[in-house]
Amino acid sequence: MLTLISPGSDSFITESTKVDLPIWIGYTIFYICITVFSIFIAVKKLRVNMKRTR
């Protein structure tokens, strides 16, 4: 969101983190990790409930 409002912040973030990837790739990797982790927890909790009802 910051890079949409202020285009110069993209170069500032790149210089600060020393990572030469576009910002959107970093966001995508972060949210994919969060999604996989959330699905893993949800499946684990649902399997516990399935064992109790049988």
Image (cartoon, rainbow, N blue to C red):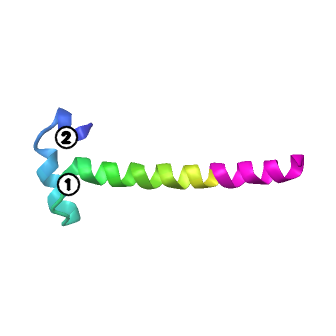
Residue neighbourhood size for the residue with mark 1, other residues' Cα within 10 Å, grouped as few (<14), some (14–19), many (≥20): some
Circle 2/circle 1 CB separation < 8 Å: yes
Residue drawn at x 14%, y 61% is 15
Q: Is residue 12 left or right of residue 35?
A: left
Q: Position of residue 42 (x, y in %)?
A: 64, 48
Q: Position of residue 30 (x, y in %)?
A: 38, 53
Q: Position of residue 51 (x, y in %)?
A: 83, 53
Q: Amino acid at mark 2?
A: Thr
| Res. 20 image quadrant | bottom left
Q: Which residues are magenta?
A: 42-54
Q: Residue 52, relative to residue 20: is it above or below?
A: above
- Is 52 in front, or is 41? 52
Residue neighbourhood size for the residue with mark 2, other residues' Cα within 10 Å, grouped as few (<14), some (14–19), many (≥20): some
Label number found at residue 29:
none
- The reply to whether the magenta stretch includes residue 47 is yes
Determine the CA span between mark 2 and mark 1. 9 Å
Q: Is residue 51 left or right of residue 31?
A: right
- Is 52 in front, or is 45? 52
| Secondary structure state at the residue bearing disc 1 | helix
The quadrant of the image that shows the N terminus is top left
Type of secondary structure dominating the magenta stretch: helix
- Is 18 in front, or is 29? 29
**Is tag 2's residue or tag 1's residue first in the polypeptide sequence?**
2
Residue bearing the label numbered 1:
13
| Secondary structure state at the residue bearing disc 2 | helix
Residue bearing the label numbered 2:
3
Residue drawn at x 32%, y 49% is 28
